[in-house]
Image (spheres, rainbow, N blue to C red):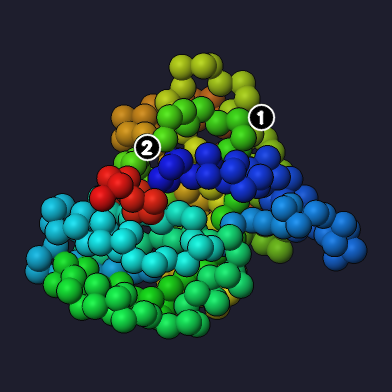
Amino acid sequence: MLIQNLGEKMNNLKLSILLSFLFLVGCSETQEEAETATEEEQGPPFSEYMTCTPGPDFNNETATMMVDEWNDLALDEALFFAAGHAPLETASLGGEGKVYWQLFWESKDAADNAWASGPSEEFAAWAQKHESVLTCDGENRRGYNAYFPYSDKDNWGEPSAEWVTYAHYCKYNGDDGLAKLQVGVEAFNAYLDNQADDVAPFRYAVYMHNGENPEPYASYDFFWMNYYKSHDGAKTSYERFANEGAEVQAMFDASATCEGPNPSTSYQFFPDPDDA
């Protein structure tokens, strides 16, 4: 969905069909069992979020120009997708009036290596040129393992350069929260299997901390993201689940207490959707 369609890109990486297994089973595997996996089965993708502050010159035109010129830089080969998220509410976890820049990497090590190399002269010049448009807090970026447990079967359809994200911030209710969440995810996938063909295009992901993330994000155990092509599609999906998914919701409620949904409008940043 995100970009060339996040699911499509992950399929190219031969990861999407493994994500459900990795999420539902991988957390409980022994190290010996994990070592039997082939190299291409090592996952999931690593995602980072940066909190960004719009400047006095921030608008659709200047932000688009900024992203276009960022795509012209020599970006690290391990980066395979990037997106921007603009919350609909005035305030979000990052604070008042913040927006977010999200990066998808092949692995945490690859991301760490890219950051460790430091900004190039071209990148520094780009950042300085556009600092009145947007500045991002790369030092306090947050890292997560990104799981898409249904990406090989969802109905997202054609790639989209713009979509909507509905985020839930969740805390486990007990030490068995993860185990119960895994059961809930399996039941939710079965619920999706039984939906009619006319359901609104939908994709979801579960983000688990990978690294020392700052507050207030660190106080949550995981983040559940629902992705839709439109807010109307989101409304339809939430209403349907409220009417038909009570048993699955009870499983989620037994696992964790979640805040949300917190809606954002989301945009593909990389690869450049305009090829500019």
Q: Residue 242 vs residue 91: left or right?
A: right
Tag shown at residue 190: 1
Tag shown at residue 160: 2
Mark yes or no: residue 193 visible.
yes
Q: Nearer the viewer, residue 269 or 33?
A: 269
- Alpha carbons under labels 2 and 1: distance apart: 26 Å
Residue found at the far left of this picture: 56
Tag shown at residue 60: none
Mark 1: few/some/many CA within 10 Å (<14, 14-19, 20+):
few
Q: Position of residue 160 (x, y in %)?
A: 37, 37
Mark yes or no: residue 222 visible.
no
Residue sitting at x 83%, y 59%:
34
Q: Nearer the viewer, residue 117 or 31?
A: 117
Give the amino acid at mark 1. Ala
Residue sitting at x 48%, y 82%:
117
Q: Which of marks 2 and 1 is nearer the N terminus?
A: 2
Q: Which of 253 and 116 is in front in this view?
A: 116
Q: In which quarter of the image is the N terminus?
A: top left
